[in-house]
Image (cartoon, rainbow, N blue to C red):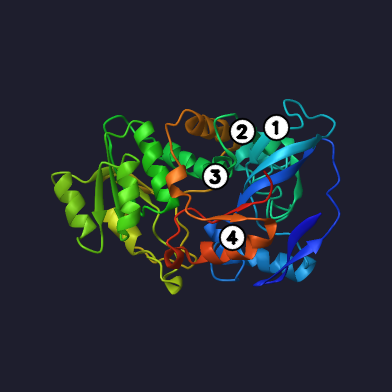
Amino acid sequence: MKAWRWYDFGDMRLDEIPVPELKHGWVIAKTKVVQPSVTEAIRALGLPTLGVKTIRKLIAERAPIQLFGHEFCAEVVEVGDGVKGLKAGDRVAASSYVPCHECPLCLTGQQHRCRRGPVIGRHLPGAFAEYLALPAETLVKIPQGVDDHEGAIVQPLSGAVTAVATAKIEMGDTVAVFGQGVMGLYCAQVAKVSGARRVIGVDVREETLSIAKKLGVDVTINAKNEDPVSSILEITNGSGVEVAFECAGGSAEQGLAGSSTLIQTIEVMRDYGKIVQVALFGQPVELDTDVFRQKSLVYLFPEAPGRLAYTVDLLASKRVSVKPTITHLLEGLEKTPEAFEITSNKASYQAINPAQVVISR
């Protein structure tokens, strides 16, 4: 089969390698649609972000190595012994984290929090290949009514579901979402579904704010034209918001917001409110801890596998829409480098969702 392998940062090659072997409790699946996450696109270049040290070590020790590709929709072609509930022809998405079943968290029923097990796209080959082997326990079936492109977004959308679940939104809450890129748009929609009375979206791009309005965001603020802190305090009659999601930050070295938007979320937060940090900064952040008196900050980790099924239900029931965020479709596995280029420079290409690669239909 054909698969992309990394020889070094920025050096990826389309190689011919054997189809993976089938194991007990695993399936072999044919990739249909795959997309690099924004973090993967940054890691592929060796730029500062979460997990880049791990990638550097893996390349040094195991190159050429299959990397990345945990956001995908694939079709099961073969099922291993011990697998229940899956058959050839089923379409699936996956949680990126595979539990080890040996650590204290796994042994106390918290497998979704395990960080000792392998990760798809790092320790296990991901979907930038014609076929991939997957542990059945990480998979969720994609039903009719959810297409392959939406299926490839199940994993990142489940991150937004986890973010909103972490926030514990109550009916009637006012919620601010800083950043109306892909994760911000997803968090805003899931917040509305979860009972938020009013969602305020903040960004500097008019095109994403326009999409936010179409997807149900109640108030949009262009931070290029107005101060979001003053505007939000005015909208809330000076009281601030109960919940804020920081989805805009990123390494300032890459032209992103850095920690400035995190400071703004703190400034619009009412007492006893909660900030959920979704974006990755890629560098140390200095904060005055005194500003957190009567406020809380949660730094989100990846999704709990148990929420994947709920995420699929949100798509199948049309309560959450991801189609308007899909801006770039590329046909054929050989287009993978272009997908990484677009995704690592989304602003230049006016992309919202990462570029998707269609490998099979």
Foreground: disc 4 or disc 3? 3
Looking at the rendered structure, the kind of residue marked 2 is: Ile
In the rendered image, the quadrant that contains the C terminus is top right
Check disc 2 and report the residue beneath it: 142
**Along the polypeptide, which appears first: circle 4 or circle 1?**
4
Contact flag, marks 2 and 4 (Cβ < 8 Å): no
**Along the polypeptide, which appears first: circle 2 or circle 4?**
4
Contact flag, marks 3 and 2 (Cβ < 8 Å): no
Position above or below: 112 against 203: above
Name the secondary structure under disc 1. Answer: loop
**Along the polypeptide, which appears first: circle 4 or circle 3?**
4
Q: Which mark is residue 90?
A: 1
**Along the polypeptide, which appears first: circle 3 or circle 2?**
2
Residue shown at 34% from the left, 35% from the top:
192
Q: Position of residue 197 (x, y in %)?
A: 27, 34
Residue placed most toward the observer, 180 or 129: 129
Looking at the rendered structure, the kind of residue marked 4 is: Glu
Contact flag, marks 1 and 2 (Cβ < 8 Å): yes
In the rendered image, the quadrant that contains the N terminus is bottom right
Position above or below: 218 against 53: above
Looking at the rendered structure, the kind of residue marked 3 is: Ile
Residue placed most toward the observer, 3 or 219: 3
Check disc 3 and report the residue beneath it: 153
